[in-house]
Amino acid sequence: MLALCVAMNEPFDPRPQETANRLRLVVLLPVLITVVGVVLIAAKLAGQFNRIEEPPARDYPPNPPRGESTPGRLLPTMAGHAIPLVQSNTFPVTNVLVGAPASAALRTPTPTNAPAASVARLPVTVAAPPNAPIVTHGPASALGELPTGGIVGRVFLRGTRPAAQALPLDPSCGKLHPSSRPQTRLYVVGTNGELADVFIGLKGLPPGQWNPPSVPIEIRQRGCEYLPYISAAQVGQTIRVFNDDPLMHNVHPTPVSEGNREQNRAQLNASSPPLDHSFPEPEPFLRFKCDVHPWMFAYVTVVAHPFFAVSAADGLFTLPEPPPGNYTLQIRHRRAGEKLVPVTVRPGKRLLATVTLDLADPLKHEVVVTEE
């Protein structure tokens, strides 16, 4: 009995509990550090992929402040015509008077106090990569063969574009590029500043229904890239996607317009049949992506009518002739932004347009238009 009382009155020894706590800390601390490291690495990789996918183009006022422009130098273009590369410190929207001689109008930008011109639409060809059998979204004029009506022109970029970044290819895709790694295509610019991948279209057409073309738009997954990167299609037109690679891709359009349906289907390899898509609602830069390779993107602008185009690698574009009337000419690039210009289309008249997008200041985008 005395021994029991002595045992009950002995002080509590905390050492076994402290030892257990130390063991727990020794076990849990490395696990905690590992989890934090994995989270940080995942966040870093996600950041790299997010930087590849550029934000949507911004909207800007259609008529920026006017300034003074200087005469531009001439660049050779179609059918012996010359389209000027306008150089100026302040970029106004300069519209050449309708009815002015085309040669004079193209050589000398209109003074800033000149009245606005009526502009017609230009059809544009889709920039296709070398050796890629890609079908364009609309009729393309060969060099030297200008349409009797419609809008033809060329797009330039002013400013120093950001350096392209190498795509973060995985080992399987890296084997498809043994000599060089493909880069981002945010700005595709020629030696004289010609800008590809610019959407040009008309807004404000009268109510009507235009049947979609029977010829599909083709997009190819080749070398773990979507080709072309930027294209356009009419509402209801088939967009046909091929897999040319010896590995699996999935085609995942992610529309934001309520009437356009998201889909996600896989293609095992080059022997898989192409996948067809079409969309009933207009949508700018509808995104296609591959979830297997998160750097793969393509953008298709879906338009309600056939009066649109995408500038080619040399900046040239051509639009079919729309019904006579007053419209808004929309010029839009995913990174450089948007420019809206009021235009007037007259029967049998062709408009020649020179577009310069200013990389530093979207309010300095310029459009020079003459009528023939």
Image (spheres, helix red, strand yellow):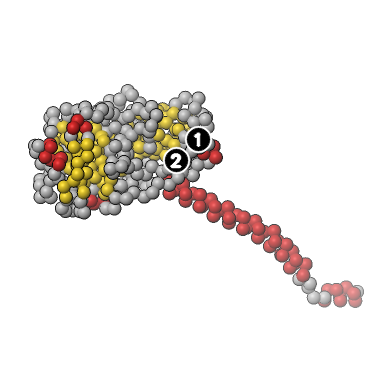
- Mark 2 = which residue? 182
Residue at the (22%, 28%) spot, across then down: 144
User: Residue 100 at what x, y percent from top left?
Assistant: 9, 38
| Mark 2 crowd level (few <14, some 14–19, many ≥20, 10 Å Cα) | some
Tag 1: amino acid? Leu
- Mark 1 = which residue? 176
Q: Earlier in the sequence, mark 1 or mark 2?
A: 1
Q: Based on the displayed image, in which of its 4 quarters is residue 221 positioned?
A: top left
In which quadrant will I find the N terminus?
bottom right
Query: Disc 1 versus disc 2: distance between alpha carbons?
Result: 10 Å
Q: Residue furthest top?
A: 214
Q: Nearer the viewer, residue 36 or 270?
A: 270
| 53 horizontally vs 322: left or right | right
Tag 2: amino acid? Pro
Q: Based on the displayed image, in which of its 4 quarters is residue 29 positioned?
A: bottom right
Res. 218 in view: no
- Is the C-beta separation of discs 1 and 2 under 8 Å? no
Count of numbered tags: 2
User: Residue 63 at what x, y percent from top left?
Assistant: 19, 49
Res. 56 in view: yes
